[in-house]
Amino acid sequence: MKIGSFTLEERLVRTIAITVALIWGAVAYFRGLLHSTPAPALHGEGLAVVLLNAATFALLGAGLWVGRPKGSRWCRIGNALLLGAMGTSLSLYAVAPHGGGGYFFSMVAMWVLLMRMPARWGVALGGATVIAVGALGEAYGHGPDYGLLAAFVGLTLGALASRQSAQAQEAARRAEASNAVLAERSHIAREIHDILAHSLSAQIVHLEGARLLLSRDGDRVQALDRVERARNLAKSGLDETRRALATLRGEVPEPKEVIAELAEEFYASTGRPCDVQVTGVPRELPPQAGLAVVRTAQEALTNVRKHAPGARTRIALRYLGDAVELEVSDTGGTEPVLELEGGGYGLVGMRERAELIGGTLETGPEGKGFRVALRVPA
C-alpha cells in the first residue's frame, strides 16, 4: 500500500527510526544534564545552565513551529529563532562543555536551517559553527573537541547531501507529472484526430461527390443519396464522440461489438460489404489494448473510404493466448478517388498508439489493395 510518496512499510520504518532517535536523544540529554559540570542549580553557573536550557528549548520549539509550513511568510522569523537557539546552545556549551547538552540543540537547529537555507548559506553556516565551537573550546580553556568538530562537519555535509537528494526527487516528481500531462494531452489529441478523421473525412467524400454530381449532370437523386449518407455519418460521428468521451472515462466497449458496428456503418455509407471474422475466445481486454484495436479498425476503414472507394473490405480479429491481432484489408478501389485537400496522420497515430503499449503495426500494399495489421499484448 502506498501513501503519498512512501509505502506503508517505509513510513512505519521512518516513524520507528525517528521515535527511537528522539527517545535516545532525550535520555542522553537529561542524563548528561544531571551529570554536567556545573550541575543545574538556582544560583551561580548552575542557574546559567538552567536559564540557557530553557531559552534554547523555547527558541528551538518556536523556530520549528513558526517556520514549519513550506514557503510560509513566517519562515524568516522561524530561521531567526533557530539561529537564536544555536546561539544560546553554544553559550550553554561554553558554560558546561561536559554534559550540558548545548551541542545537541545546536545540531538540531543547524540541521533544520541547512534544510531550509540555500546551499551557499548552508555552507557558510556550517563553517561558522565549526569555527565557533573550536573558538569556544580555546577561549574557555578546555581545548577544541575534535570529535565534536568532526560531528558538525559531518552534519553539514549530510544535510546538504540530503537537501540535494530531496531537490532531485522533487525535480523527478515534477518531470514525471509533466510527462503524464503530456501523455494525456497526446492521448486526447489522438482521440480527437481519430474521431474527426473517421467522421468528417467520410462526410467530405460524400458531400464532394454530391457537389460534382450537381455541377456536372444535375443528377439530384444520386446527389441526395450522397447528402443523406453524409448526414448519417454526421450522426454516427456524434455517437462516436460520445463513445470516445466514455472511453476517456475508462468505459471501453468490447472491440468485437464496436468492430461489428463499424462494419455495418461502412456498408451503409459505401454500399460495399465489410466482412468481419472473429477467431479465438473473446475476453475483456485492458483499456489501452481495446482502444488501440477499435481506433485502428476505425482509421483503416476511413482510409479505405478516402483512398479506395468501391473496395470490398475484410476485418479479422484474433484472440490469442497473450495478445490480440487485428487485420484490415481491402481489394483495392474501383471508383475514382476524389481529390481532397490536406493530409492526415492516421498511420502515424495508429503506430504511435500501438508502440505506447508494446504492440506493433504493419501496413503496406497487398495485391491490388492495402493491409493494416495490428498486434497488441493483452
Image: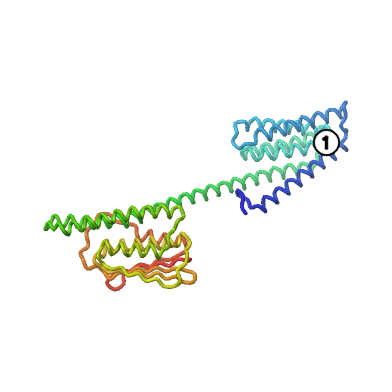
Residue 305 in the image: x percent, y percent?
27, 62
In the displayed structure, does residue 77 sit left or right of residue 287? Answer: right
Taking 346 as reference, is 128 above or below it?
A: above
In the depicted structure, whether residue 41 falls above or below residue 340: above
Instruction: Using the rendered view, name the quadrant where residue 34 is placed.
Output: top right
Image x and y of residue 249, in percent: 45, 52
Q: Position of residue 36 (x, y in %)?
A: 87, 36
Q: Residue furthest left?
A: 217
Quarter containing the N terminus: bottom right
Give left or right: position of 280 versus 265.
right
Count of numbered tags? 1
Colour style of the rendered protein structure: rainbow
Q: Amino acid at mark 1?
A: Gly
Query: In the rendering, at what x and y percent does residue 54 appear?
Result: 79, 30
Q: Quadrant of residue 80?
A: top right
- Which residue is at a point 61% across and 52% down the rendered structure image? 2
369 or 120: which is nearer to us? 369
Look at mark 1 in the image and give the residue it sits on: 100
Q: As rendered, which of 6 and 140 lies closer to the eye?
A: 6
Element at label 1:
loop
Q: Is residue 323 left or right of residue 211?
A: right
